[in-house]
Amino acid sequence: MAQYDFKKITVVPTGNDLIDIVLSRTQRQTPTVIHKGNAISRVRQFYMRKVKFTETNFTDKLSKTIEDFPRVEDIHPFYGDLLHVLYNKDHYKLALGQLNTARNLIKRIREDYVKLLKYGDSLYRCKSLKRAALGRMCTVTKRIGPSLAYLEHVRQHMARLPSINTGAPTILICGCPNVGKSSFLNKITRADVEVQPYAFTTKSLFVGHTDYKYLRYQVIDTPGLLDRPLEDRNIIEMCSVTALVNLHAAILFFLDLSGSCGYSISQQAALFHSIKMMFRNNPVLIVCNKTDLQTLEGLSGEDLKLVMEMKSAALKTIPGQGGEAANDQDVLLTMSTITDEGVMAVKNAACQRLLDQRSERKMKSKKMPTVLNRFHVAMPKPRDQKERPVCIPQAVLEARAEEAAHEERKTEKDIENENGGAGVYSASLRKHYILADDDWKLDILPEFLDGHNVYDFIDPDILQRVEELEREETAVEEDGGDFEMEDEDFTAEAEKDLQEIRKRKKLLIQKHRIKKSTAESRPTVPRKFDKDRKFTTERMGRQLSSLGIDPSRAIERARSRSVSRKGRKRERSVGGDGEDEMEIDGGLDNKKKMRLRSRSMSRSRSVLSQRSLGEVVPGEGFKDSAQKMKAVTMARNATKKRNKDARRGEADRVIPTLRPKHLFSGKRSIGKTDRR
Amino acid sequence: MRLEFCWFCSSKIYPGHGIQFVRNDAKIFRFCRSKCHKNFKMKRNPRKVKWTKAYRRLHGKDMTKDSTFELERKRNRPERYDRNVMENTLKAIKKIDKIRHDRAADHIAQRWKPKAAKERREARKELEQSISLIKAPLAIQAQEPAITVPKIKVKVPKQQTLEQPMEE
């Protein structure tokens, strides 16, 4: 028996499609260029190749189709009958036969035309022959068009047939329409069959799978059966009949006790009796569904009698135990798919029946004795009549008793569940600590103190050591910490002097720094051209007195030797003031002295105020008046410009606002703002 | 949880701070902040980086040897909890801490002491040398006649020196 996989049948093309496919292949895959100038043998070869190629393609495709489609005789009778029911065996065979004929015809055509082509004498003749050949092949294909279409239709339907494994243990559900077969299937398997209140909701077979005692069982749901003679049955009913007849399965006949399916119990009983021929050796279970609406006990006497009749018929199918009341329960079952009561029991009963049947069969088979012969259970012969019961040592018994007692102990898990479960209650791990004093169990243990790890300091005799430490400390203190300084501190006067010295030194350094920095840019004017009148006797006197010396004598001396004095001396000698000359060294009287001094001072002062702009002053360094005027104008011009910019001097480069907003923001009306 | 010490600067690393680096030889380096971490990555030696404790201890700036350090030791064996011991320990920590701080401060004060003496000496010298900036020697002489430099008179015979060159 060849293995057929209905889902793997190749697509059957329509007639025109087949023609198109083959011809385009020929055109693509054979050489296309030939000239009449070529050698005749080459021309013949060219066209023969085309004819052969076309024929090969047609044949291949048709053969594939013919082989893919199952032969009704070769497959399992269930499928055979199903195919017949659905597609009409004859029609099916005819179609396939037509394909076969077509194939042979095409082969014949090719043979004929190849023979003719062998003697073609011109390109034109060869070409015509080839055209004729191809044309005839295509005509043949066109003629089988309807068959191809039919086969395609069949193929599509076949691919969607439920994959029923005919060898696996199966449970078949049958009964009147609307009794609850599909709901039962939905309950015990993962199938999701449509359940609706109208009859013939299920229009074909549906398969589900369920497990029982580590075995996979197929559960097949059938469309409802009506009580009609076989000839009158429609295709849908025929499907279920096929399944009933051909499959070896446990049959669950569904009864609707309440009559809500639309058929009374008598009608259902009639149906049962009419199909019971088909049960043959299959185990039968009568399942009363919809007990939530109507229980078995609540049935009327008539109906109950009918049900009992059915039960007795079903009992006959039990292998080897016909009619025993002991297995009563296995044959007649009640359940309700809505309330789920008894559903599992039904399934288990059905599966068990199948298993039992299987094991029975195995026992009955010829192989069994050979297998049984291989077993031999050896039983030791009793030596004497002494009773030797089981011996369990006392300790083990005690331990067992203790364990049993222990099981009543409350575990941590129980406590957790009591107090709200895993997320709510967290077990206290401290409960079972072994400590010297049980009060300490709930103590909070500090880990850090003042930036130290407490655990680094723990020591049973830490207090003792700390005491030692403290004793050390006090001992050190009593020793008298520091020695006194050998040097004495400074007196207040000395301190003051020191500060003065330091201040003076700082001033000197500052002045020196200023002088150093400006020495390159300014000419150093000798002291005798002292324009600012810094070097006065008064100043000298002040400085000397700050040093602690009496300045009067020094001032006198300085003044007597001053230039202005000397200058006056000369003038007076020209004028002929001889008397004064004589008395210079010692005794000028005070009046004269004062006059001299006052005049000399006032002269220099008035000079300052009376000097005109262009007048050359000896200490300044100008050649003549013109040069000085030029310098003055230059200075004026420079300052004018600076004043306009509000700059304090040459070195003033301050910018009051580095990034004024009006220059650094805003868009331009034309142009870019890359640079600002 | 433990307070660890930064490998670079030896400061305390509190929980939630810093980075731990484990080298392929399983040595663990803990850093208190990215400054130390980055210095480590630059392969700087903490003993040469001035602001670290390692430098300070090496160069004697901070106290190194003291009995208070021995009281704080990492113990690897867990002790059974005893409330009294814990209490005593907590009190002791405070005292030990105080003592250690005082001793460290003393150490630093000891370091600074010679400076005062030196400063005094220098000030004295400055006073002596630069007194002339504020007080003229004459004034000082006038004030304290005791402090006068005694004049040394040297007699030089005149005739002898003249005769000798003439003879030659």
Image (cartoon, coloured by chain):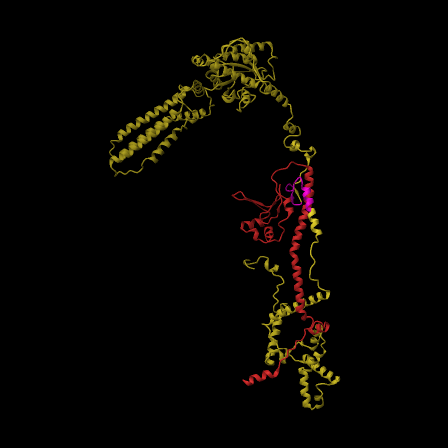
Chain colours: A yellow, B red
Q: Is residue A278 left or right of residue A112?
A: right
Residue at horizontal 69 percent and vertical 41 percent from the top: B88
Q: In x, y percent, where is residue A522? A: 60, 73
Query: In the rendered image, which quarter contains the N terminus of chain A?
Result: top left
Q: Position of residue A17 (x, y in %)?
A: 39, 31
Tell whether position A436 is magenta.
no
* Image quadrant where one finds the C terminus of chain A: bottom right
Left or right position of A492 against A185: right
Relative depth, front residue between A98 and A583: A583
Quarter occupied by residue A153: top left
Residue A516 position in % (x across, y down): 60, 70
Q: Can residue A437 be seen at all in this image of the molecule? A: yes
Q: Viewer-proximal residue, A416 or A320?
A: A416
Residue A303 falls in image quadrant:
top right
In this rendered view, identify the residue nearer to me: A342 or A4.
A342
Measured along the vertical axis of the image, is residue A388 above or below residue A477? above
Magenta-highlighted residues = A450-469
- Residue A462 is covered by the magenta coloring: yes
Q: Residue at x 57, y 83 (%)?
A: B164
Q: Position of residue A619 (x, y in %)?
A: 62, 79
Q: Nearer the viewer, residue B43 or A176?
A: B43
Q: Is residue B15 above or below residue A632?
A: above
Q: Is residue B151 left or right of residue A113?
A: right
Q: Is residue B94 visible?
A: no
